[in-house]
Amino acid sequence: MDHEAVACASETFKLPLLVQTCSHGREYLCLPRFRRLLTMTYGASYAESMMEEISKGLGLDANEFGFVVSGAGGVGEIVNGRYTERGTYNGKPIYRNDNDMAIYFSAFWKIGCKDTACVWLYAVKDAIGPKPPTGAWTTYGYTRTDAEPAPSVASGVMPDAVPCDSLFAWLSASQPVGCESEPMSRSRFAGKLEREVFDEVVRLLNQIDFQGDGGVLCHAPPGPYSGTAPVEAGAWLLRVVGTGEWESWDGTRRGNIRIVADTEVPDLSIQVSFPSGNHDDAPARLEPASLEFYTLEHDNYGTSIRACFQIGVEPNDVHWEVFIHGSGIMQGWYRSSTNDGSVKGKATGEFRPHTEAPPVEAPEEPTALTAGLIAEGLVAKRATQPMSVEWEVPEAVAEGKVVLVALGGPPCSGKGTLAERILQALLKKEVAAKIVGQDAYCYTHLEEIAQGMVLTPGMVRWQDFFQGLDQEVAQVAKVGTKTKPGVVLLDGPLLYWMRQLDSVLRVRFFLRTSRNEFFRRQRAKAAAAGRASAPSGFLEHVAWPAHLAWGQPRQPPHILDVPDGIRAGPLPREVLENAVEVLQDCGILPVYR
């Protein structure tokens, strides 16, 4: 359960109602009432086992609900109250209350203002454990006497209500493969009959195989992406770890595989063993695999992740398609030139409720998101996308007189700004250079539908894009030589989609942003342009999934991580410095003055 809900749960009216509504509108399920209904309907033993499973599934452990500080006097009264975890500091959790006072670790556990760590009000000398100690604290280290008496610290009390969206997100993510959690799990609950809500929760609980072969999923830690009042009960799998084995269809070859996928800060890493012996040989040790290509796609309303990737190059390439389900099951297949086979295993990971409803196909008033978006297939599952285009590698590129440098990443991640900065650095070193931006080659009507973003390969006028690339290469080739080649910079969110282009790139950069930073940048861009932000649900259910599916690099690039937050600016200095260093190491950007 998300920790932001703890304080909200305490605000629910202490009424004998199964579903209660908090002052800000978020709906909660009353656990004591639910336990009583379970006991009356199915008996005490069933009720006890189901409540235990709910507690484990939602992480309802009193230790996870922060701490309560009480009894501080004088100027220290401001530290009293409930503290919840708000990130880390010095490698350990930091907890804050509503007054922005903190329980934090610096040599030992302290209470005060973390921003002025040299001054604190209360502490427990020699307390260096992973979490703050409970019991009486002291004024150790605070020389004045105006903060007496010192407080006591107790573990947070587990709330007696859980958010309906978190509950149904967990129920949805835990369903067996192929089971549906519709319809009530995707609707609001206020006004519904108590028995109707109770029967739906019990139905979903009974479909979960708590003793099965699946792995364990937990609710993701709180973060800026978690809204305080999500409107949907669907769930996103965020980070998963799948472990299992692959086996050829004829049973003559087998090995182990481990998949780690992250859809918050996109990444996919694979470890696999390829035994060379016969059927009786023990699988070899897992080794990291170099990926030539990968995509990530959410399925089943976000409760499954589909990972497609390629290991090795022709003729020894192996193509994989693996589904990791919220029920804790991993299954899939692989294909190579020598044999095909299946993949099966378990999965563990984290999920989080949807924070916005998916875009509707037919809203009351026509908008740019309505018929066009659906008709063009931008949100269609596995929509047909162009895979190749007629294009011959320019002679100057093949001969090394011109090198191609690509800057990929999600829309509004700073690619264009970085390209301009690199261009200026190259020109100062008297290196012939040009920029080709992919955004300029998007079908206009589709760009309007997609809120100014290039989201899918089908939105790009690829033939025109390659013609523009050829023209800039021809211009740079007039002065480029093999010893001092010219440079054409390419920036765009889908540069790595076309294999024939990707294969001739000299340098590949990928500006990687988190999902939350992507949302923040898109909203800030809309505000700066004086236009309305994207329609509700568009960024979460259309734009970001499109980036996961079609915007990932093919071959291992130079990753440039873009930090979260407005303070980093459109292009953080460290990102530019890292890019310049790479170009210098590759001999593209001269280091002489």
Image (cartoon, rainbow, N blue to C red):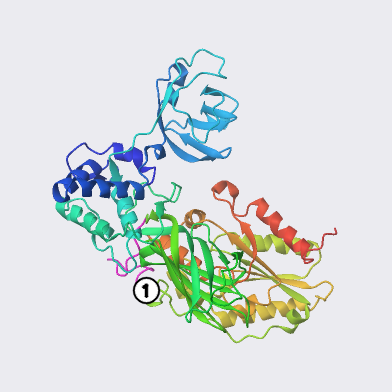
Q: x and y percent of residue 75 in the render?
A: 46, 18
Position of 187 relative to 282 (above/below): above
The residue depicted at 32 percent of the width and 46 percent of the height is 55
Give left or right: position of 537 versus 87. Answer: left
Position of 314 relative to 346 (above/below): below
**Visible in this render: residue 436?**
yes
Q: x and y percent of residue 317 in the render?
A: 60, 79
In this rendered view, identify the residue nearer to me: 554 or 396: 554
Answer whether residue 9 is magenta in the image: no
Within-10-Å neighbours for mark 1: few <14, some 14–19, many 20+: some
Can you tell which quarter of the image residue 32 is in? top left
Can you tell which quarter of the image residue 231 is in? bottom left
Chain part drawn in magenta: 356-373
Number of marks: 1
Give left or right: position of 470 versus 98. Answer: right
Q: Given the image, on which type of amino acid does mark 1 rest?
A: Ile
